[in-house]
């Protein structure tokens, strides 16, 4: 399990660096986006990954790894948007962005470690393409939740799904390096 913790941290390190650098370039312009729009951005990335997996080739010279990293970062944006839904200020300081990013990544990692314990690291025996399919399934679930005005009867909410999607993407990044 300690190996998984280290691998998680290594995968997230690059994602966080990209997130912080893009904040310096663009600020928090993404704060304008609704959660549904963030889900669409994740859908675009997951669909591209699946297309590359199925076709075995790509025409745009950006591999699958940056797409998974983008999914992680969009999921964090979604989690931040859910938390700040009543705040009207668009621009957040770099310090606040980093603090919120770290808060949600820690929550995702804690969740992953708990589930990983219970499931016995079964993800290490799964194909990377399965994680892609799981991401696409979660997107459809969250769209249904949004159509139900964010209410669920007995299922997890959007925030839990976003956290699982971070972890699926981290698992994919780890598996791709194995």
Image (cartoon, helix red, strand yellow):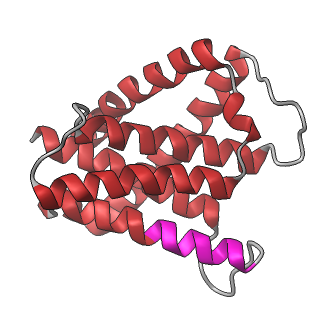
Residue lying at 41% horizontally and 29% vertically, measured from the top left: 15
Tell me, yes or no, if residue 121 can be seen here. Answer: no
The residue segment tinted magenta is 138-148
Residue lying at 49% horizontally and 66% vertically, measured from the top left: 139
Q: Position of residue 88 (x, y in %)?
A: 90, 37
Quadrant hosting residue 98: top right
Q: Position of residue 166 (x, y in %)?
A: 44, 49
Q: Is residue 31 above or below residue 24?
A: below
Q: Position of residue 17 (x, y in %)?
A: 45, 19
Quadrant hosting residue 130: bottom left
The residue nearer to you, when weighing 100 against 15, is: 15
Q: Does the magenta segment cover residue 37?
A: no
Residue lying at 63% horizontally and 48% vertically, measured from the top left: 78
Q: Which secondary structure type mostly characterizes the magenta part of the structure? A: helix
Residue lying at 62% horizontally and 64% vertically, measured from the top left: 158
Which residue ends up furthest to the bottom in the rendered image? 153
Q: Does the magenta segment cover residue 145?
A: yes
Q: Is residue 156 left or right of residue 83?
A: left
Q: Is residue 51 above or below residue 10?
A: below
How many labels sit on residues?
0
Quadrant hosting residue 59: top left
Q: Is residue 71 left or right of residue 156?
A: left
């Amino acid at each position: 399990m300690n190996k998984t913790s280290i691998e998680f941290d290594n995968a997230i390190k690059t994602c966080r660096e990209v997130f912080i650098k893009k904040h310096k370039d663009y600020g928090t312009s993404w704060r304008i986006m609704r959660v549904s729009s963030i889900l669409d951005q994740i859908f675009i990335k997951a669909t591209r990954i699946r297309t590359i997996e199925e076709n075995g080739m790509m025409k745009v010279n950006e591999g699958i790894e940056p797409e998974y990293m983008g999914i992680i970062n969009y999921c964090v944006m979604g989690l931040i948007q859910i938390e700040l839904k009543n705040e009207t200020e668009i621009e957040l300081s770099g310090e606040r962005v980093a603090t919120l990013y770290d808060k949600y990544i820690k929550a995702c990692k804690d969740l992953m470690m708990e589930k990983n314990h219970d499931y016995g690291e079964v993800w290490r025996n799964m194909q990377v393409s399965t994680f892609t399919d799981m991401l696409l399934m979660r997107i459809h679930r969250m769209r249904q939740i949004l159509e139900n005005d964010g209410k669920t009867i007995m299922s997890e909410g959007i925030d839990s799904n976003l956290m699982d999607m971070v972890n699926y993407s981290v698992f994919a990044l780890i598996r791709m390096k194995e």
